[in-house]
Amino acid sequence: MAARRDVPGIRQHNAPAGGWGALRATAKAVREQMNITEAPLTLLRTNKPDGFDCLGCAWPDKEHTSTFQFCENGAKAVTWEATKKRVTPEFFAAHTVTSLLEWSDYQLEDEGRLTHPMSYDRESDRYQAISWDQAFARIGEVLRAMPSPNMVEFYTSGRASNEAAFLFQLYAREYGTNNFPDCSNMCHEATSVGLPKSIGIGKGTVSLDDFDNCELIIAMGHNPAQTCFC
């Protein structure tokens, strides 16, 4: 059996994951990350026609008859993106990159959003702030030096907003390539090609129509309670 690890943000939990517990966990994340007066208005715009898509999932497009159109994890993803916490140049002046390698992903993200473009300085082993003009100039210098646009990959996180991803792909196409995968592509492109050839179907082996015809559903190895609480 694998040894228990002390992972920041992970603890033993014996209570139900949904219901009031999910609401309390969401309220705690909001209180820690966002301004309490701004948070409700931001969350109420999640997955709404006049708002924005959730950063953590693909909420189904349907008639928006509910006030709350997000789940617990979606609300937490929004609070982490809209956090009031900031990582300033003073933070990097106090921490070397070598020391930050010892931090967990949870600890690093919990510090907040970057406030400046940063450049790594090998002599001091620290990130140092540079201006936006300097950052764009350095990016442009590298891109202009490439023999072919197809030698560049414009990778993005799957948590990037649809609006940001749209602008990013326009930039890549204008540069001359369509090499802009995100983490979802990296996961699913292999399954969508490999699985149909081996077992006849890509990604999940259960279709939505199967749920209408089955008599028993067994869910194992995941947390089905962390769905919407609307």
Image (spheres, helix red, strand yellow):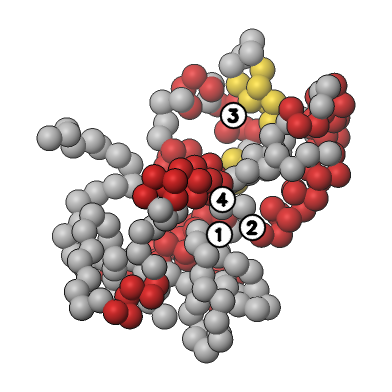
Per the image, the residue denoted by label 1 is 55
Q: Is residue 48 visible from the viewing direction of this image?
A: yes
Contact check, label 4 and label 3, Cβ < 8 Å: no
Marks 1 and 2: in contact by CB < 8 Å? yes
Q: Measure how far apart labels 3 and 1 are at the Cα level.
A: 27 Å
- The residue tagged 3 is 92
Q: Residues within 10 Å of mark 3 (few under 14, many from 20)?
A: some
Q: Residue furthest top?
A: 123
Residue 26, above or below 80:
below
**Identity of the amino acid at label 3?**
Phe
Q: Of label 4 and label 1, which has the lower sequence position?
A: 1
Q: Which residue in the structure is indicated by mark 4? A: 158
Tell me the kind of residue under disc 2.
Answer: Ser
Query: In the rendering, which numbered label is found on residue 175?
Result: none
Residue type beneath disc 4: Gly
Q: Amino acid at mark 1?
A: Leu
- Residue corresponding to mark 2: 161
Circle 4 sits in a helix, a strand or a loop, which is it? loop
Q: Nearer the viewer, mark 3 or mark 1?
A: 1
Please tell me whether mark 4 or mark 3 is closer to you in this view.
4
Dot 2: element: loop
